[in-house]
Amino acid sequence: MRAAVYERTGPSSVIEVRERPLPEPGPGEVRVRVAVSGVNPTDWKSRSGATAAPLAAPKVPNQDGAGTVDAVGEGVTAFAAGDRVWLWDVAWQTDEGTAQEYVVVPQGKAVALPAGESFDTGASLGIPALTAHRALTAHEDGPSRLAPGALGGTVVLVTGGAGAVSHAAIQLARWAGATVLTTVSGAEKGELARRAGAQHVINYRDEDVPARVREVSPRGADVIVDVAVVANISDDIDAIAPGGTVAVYAVDTDQPLTMPVRPAMVPNLRLQFLMTYTVTDRQKADAVAAVSAALADGALRVGEEHGLPITRFPLEETAAAHDAVEAGTVGKVLIDL
């Protein structure tokens, strides 16, 4: 089988496509014929060496994917050959990611993909949707698992509304009944956020974000899903509702977070930093279950018409796919197998 592999961390040029033996599933495992592999920022950061330890063995990148079960190990009853699935956290603490024609995973990391859903959708879930779910459930008085109506009466502000996590956060929040606002840097990204389902779009380059939030919700936003808290913290404090939570999921800097203490104390603001890989088992199980339910309800959609454009690469161009994500390509980058 073909696989994208790197034997040392570094630039994308360390990735090469080579032939590898077909793996066999062990007890409790399934082998999946990967149709589409999804690329996330953590994939190129890990490959670059920025967020991962030195390699102990050759590594196949990419956490997310979708495909068809083609073999099951002893004791597996949840799946059979021919079942369509989406995959999550595949490469976390292993050397086997989804950028290969077949991958063996514990059965718990494979989730049924409804018959009407595309492999593109399945490969776009994983890191983005599970991260978004944890962010939306970080409020101490909120639900631990999203469902229709679970966020009824809740006001959610999603920063950077054209990103993959933001896209999933908008869709999940709307599915759960929240009022959703989002910030963008321009008209094109604003249109993508609207297609995702955001009811109020704020151009942060020329609008007063907290003022716009309070026009919609005088008390402020109950939950802020923030992709750039170092830059946004002042606006977050000014826009937060009493007892509100700022969920921080991505910071591409080691720069310290500097903030005024008393203005954050007055509304009892809560900062919740999160990384989807290291949430509790219960939080991850709730996220997988809720994302599966939203998917079954048709609430999670990808593609330009749904606000998440797709950029595609063949397996042989896995390095270029990583470069595209690193360069900030708008939408979702997928690899076809």
Image (tube, helix red, strand yellow):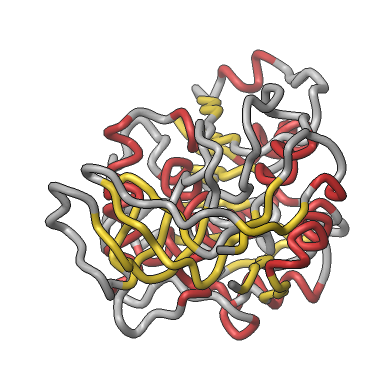
- Decide if residue 153 is in sight here: yes
The residue at the point 59 percent across, 61 percent down is 38
Quadrant position of residue 273? top right
Where does residue 69 sit, x and y in percent of width and height?
32, 66
| Of the pair 121 and 161, the residue shown nearer to us | 121
Quadrant position of residue 42? top right
Q: Quadrant of the C terminus?
A: bottom right
- Furthest residue toward top: 261
The residue at the point 67 percent across, 45 percent down is 43
Residue 195 higher or lower than 45, as above or below: below
Residue 79 higher or lower than 308, as above or below: above
| Of the pair 279 and 189, the residue shown nearer to us | 279
Where does residue 194 sit, x and y in percent of width and height?
61, 75
Q: Is residue 235 left or right of residue 146?
A: right
| Of the pair 335 and 291, the residue shown nearer to us | 335
Residue 274 higher or lower than 28, as above or below: above
- Decide if residue 182 is in sight here: no
Where does residue 223 sit, x and y in percent of width and height?
49, 43
Question: Tag count in the figure?
Answer: 0
Where does residue 31 sit, x and y in percent of width and height?
36, 58
The residue at the point 62 percent across, 73 percent down is 336
Q: Quadrant of the N terminus?
A: bottom right
The residue at the point 87 percent across, 49 percent down is 13
